[in-house]
Image (cartoon, rainbow, N blue to C red):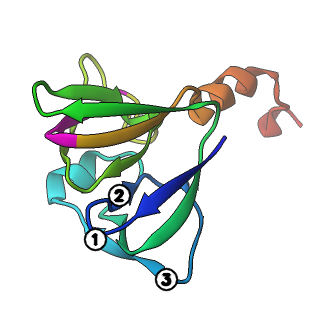
Amino acid sequence: MIQELTLDGTHQWRLNTGAFLAMDTTAGYSMIRQKAGRALLGGTGGFFIMETTGTGTMLVSAYGDLLPVDLDGSHDYVIDNNHVVAWESSLDYSIEIASGTFGFTTGEGLVNHFTGRGRVYLQTRNVEALANLVKPYLPDKSSN
């Protein structure tokens, strides 16, 4: 799924790894450093995430459908980290361990905790889950 997002004085975006597709030449982006805790726990993005600047339009891509979630500031919202595509920079967020075990190599078990007012786009499917589903059916290199 591809979604067009508007960039202007009141709408700027932060993107999870792999979400960026294209943007107008009047718009731009910079890589911003996350807090150490976010970067160390984040299965995607590492120490830096993409943040937009300028005006125009940007295209983001997702696996499955893209659903907008509007937060009005009255309550927090928690989304599985692998399903977060983009969020307005007006939102504050933290990356947290959901519960139980955490996979350091996959980032499995992480959630994004959003607070404030703004929009989050989430994807309905998870490409890592698909890869794990298919993995048992792929040839094993060690058995050759």
Q: CA distance from mark 3 to mark 2?
A: 17 Å
**Residue 111 visible in the picture:** no
Left or right of 131 in this view: 43: left
Residue 54's x, y, as percent?
A: 37, 77
Q: Earlier in the sequence, mark 3 or mark 2?
A: 2
Residue drawn 48% across and 71% down? 56
The three-letter code of the residue at mark 3 reads: Thr
Residue drawn 29% across and 64% down? 47
The residue that disc 2 covers is 14
Q: Residues within 10 Å of mark 1 (few under 14, many from 20)?
A: few
Secondary structure beneath label 2 = strand
The residue that disc 1 covers is 32
Q: Quadrant of the C terminus?
A: top right
Residue drawn 26% across and 55% down? 39
Please identify the dominant SS of the magenta region.
strand
**What's the magenta region?**
109-117
Q: Earlier in the sequence, mark 1 or mark 3?
A: 3
Seen as rendered, the residue at the extreme bottom is 25
Left or right of 22 in this view: 41: left
Q: What is the quadrant of residue 21 in the picture?
A: bottom right
The residue that disc 3 covers is 26
